[in-house]
Amino acid sequence: MPAINNAIVARDSFSHIVRRENWAQQEAGVVVVFCIVFVVGVGLIGLWISKALAKRRAQKATVHA
């Protein structure tokens, strides 16, 4: 006789999965803040890349001139 019944373990796991609630719907403000932080971060990274490319183009223009 096994010490752990697999059917009971599976039933408990399934009931845990089924009763999960929608965290994103309950905490809409947190999700909005995450989105805003992501958009600002992507914008800053894009700005940094743009400046780096502009600096590289300026250096190439002075070297070839």
Image (spheres, rainbow, N blue to C red):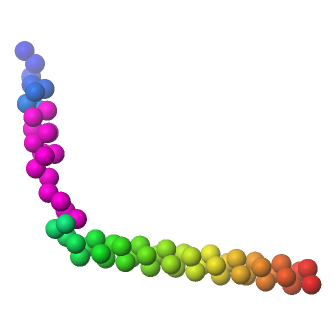
Q: Residue at x 7, y 30 (%)?
A: 8
Say left or right for 51 vs 34: right
Most frequent secondary structure within the magenta stretch: helix
Q: Position of residue 50 (x, y in %)?
A: 64, 79
Say left or right for 6 vs 64: left
Q: Residue at x 10, y 27 (%)?
A: 7
Q: Residue furthest right?
A: 65
Q: Position of residue 1 (x, y in %)?
A: 7, 15
Q: Quadrant of residue 28?
A: bottom left
Q: Position of residue 45 (x, y in %)?
A: 54, 75
Above or below, comparing residue 38 to residue 6 in the picture:
below
Residue range in magenta is: 10-24
Q: Residue furthest front?
A: 25
Q: Quadrant of residue 51?
A: bottom right
Nearer to me, 56 or 2: 56
Q: Quadrant of residue 14?
A: top left
Q: Is residue 29 magenta?
A: no
Q: Residue at x 30, y 75 (%)?
A: 32
Identify the image quadrant of the C terminus: bottom right
Q: Residue at x 19, y 70 (%)?
A: 27
Q: Is residue 13 magenta?
A: yes
